[in-house]
Image (cartoon, grey):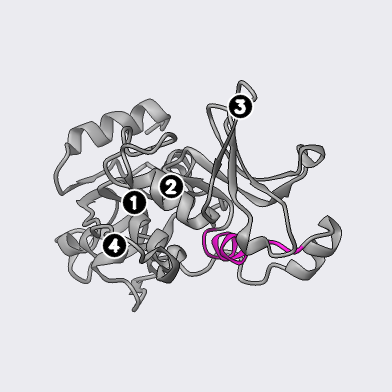
Amino acid sequence: MELIQATVDDLLARLGPGDGYLYLAGDLDPQDLTDLLSDRYGAPRTLVLDGFTDPTVDESGGAALLAPFEDRAVKIRAWAYGDQWVGTGTVRDAEGVERPVLVIAHREMPEPLAVAPGEDGDVDWMERLRRITGWTQPAQRPDVDWAEVESRLGTALPGDYKRMVETFGKGAFDGYLGLNQEPWTHLREDGLLIWAGTEHEDLYCWRADGDDPDRWPVVVRSFDGEDVSFECRAAEFVCRILIDPCHRFTMARYFDTHWFMNYRESV
């Protein structure tokens, strides 16, 4: 069975929007399907390997994909995409034959927590960002040498940004807002450091004024060169554009649910 992205589209369409699974042709290489899905959805999480289920897998981490197979899953990789879990790998059928499979399941999205007036200063915006995106994977880059990065840049960096990079790694929120793994300095002559950007060529920056980077405001430089300032930190800014449909740079108009597409290569 030859696999291309159009084939994947057809298979997903056959499954429809609800929970379900398909046994695939026996001559299909499950790794080929994993690679195509990784190109589309980012790096997967391994739920089952050699018949052993990751003990940390729960409903927030894709357990619904395993429900149809009881203890017959051999290898399952999973992706969070909007309000769905998508999984592929191999399982044993009712006769005990190992077969490639494609499976989807509904993904429960946690309700974003409201922020009461005056509460902003007490909010852990990184924890809220994890909640909004349904992020359950381990920290992707826990060993970043920030001392080396900051020495090379000649400045300390905001703590919430460093937590974002350590937690999510290389990738994009909603597959759209790309997180820089260290700030770009292209606009340094304007006093700006770039920490993220979008497909529409908007650049998300800090106005690097003062000795306390945790007090640097976010500045959006649009594709036409306009600068728009926001008196908040990076993690709060991302939270707000994900869920506030009235925000000037909102992504809530385009996506009802939110996720982080990890660009780490699958293994």
Residue at (46% x, 49% y) in the render: 238
**Circle 2: is it few (<14), some (14-19), or many (20+) Cα within 10 Å?**
many
Circle 1 is placed at which residue position? 88
Q: Secondary structure at mark 2?
A: helix
Give the residue type at disc 1: Thr
Q: Mark 1 or mark 4, which is nearer to you?
A: 4
Residue 143 visible in image? yes
The magenta segment = 156-168
Q: In the shown orientation, is residue 98 left or right of residue 209? A: left
**In terms of sequence position, does the residue under pointer 4 or pointer 2 come before the other?**
2
* Kind of residue at disc 3: Glu
Q: Give the image location of residue 222, x and y in percent.
A: 58, 28
Q: Is residue 261 left or right of residue 98?
A: right
Of the image marks 4 and 3, the number of the one nearer the N terminus: 4
Circle 3 residue: 226
Q: Quadrant of residue 211?
A: bottom right
